[in-house]
Amino acid sequence: MNHSVEDVIRELENRRIAALVSTDLAALNNLLADDLVHVHGNGKIDDKEEYLQGVASKYRYHSIQRGDLNIRVFGNVAIVVGRLSQTV
């Protein structure tokens, strides 16, 4: 089966959501870029290590729902925009 870049990105996002809800740190570590910069809703900024530590000890993701994703691909870069609703 031939998957489009958009299909692959959607699948990776589904895996990221599943890893967050199940607190699967190994899966998250594999899915997230080593140079991750995560900006929380309150403006706090975490690097990958800080983010994973937070998922392990501070944040409990009870549910995450994504709306439709608008995925635009430019060479080897993709911009993904879409609604996210989560209970943490």
Image (spheres, rainbow, N blue to C red):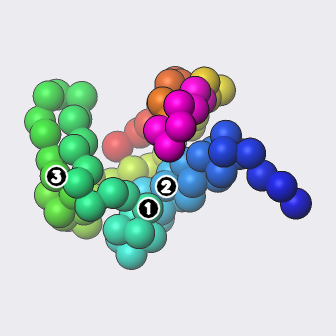
Q: How far is the residue under mark 3 from the one under mark 2?
A: 17 Å
Residue 54, x across and y down, in percent: 20, 57
Secondary element under disc 1, as helix, strand or loop, is helix
Which residue is found at the position 66% from the left and 45% from the top? 5
**Which residue type does callout 1 highlight?**
Leu
Between discs 3 and 1, the one toward the N terminus: 1
Q: Residue furthest bottom?
A: 26
The residue under label 3 is: 47
Q: Which mark is residue 31?
A: 1
The residue under label 2 is: 16
Q: Quadrant of the N terminus?
A: bottom right
The answer to the question of whether label 3 and label 2 lie on touching residues, with beta carbons closer than 8 A, is no
Q: Is residue 66 above or below residue 33?
A: above
Q: Is residue 74 magenta?
A: yes
Q: Residue furthest front?
A: 75
Q: Which mark is residue 58?
A: none
**Which residue type does callout 3 highlight?**
Asp
The answer to the question of whether label 2 and label 1 lie on touching residues, with beta carbons closer than 8 A, is yes
Between discs 3 and 2, the one toward the N terminus: 2
Residue 51, x across and y down, in percent: 22, 55
Question: Which circle, 3 or 2, is nearer the viewer?
Answer: 3
Q: Is residue 84 magenta?
A: no
Residue 2, x across and y down, in percent: 83, 55
Q: Is residue 34 above or below residue 25?
A: above
Q: Quadrant of the C terminus?
A: top left
Which image quarter: residue 23? bottom left
Q: Is residue 52 above or below residue 62?
A: below
Q: Residues within 10 Å of mark 1 (few under 14, many from 20)?
A: some
Residue 24, x across and y down, in percent: 42, 70
Question: What is the span of residues highlighted in magenta in the rendered image?
Answer: 71-77
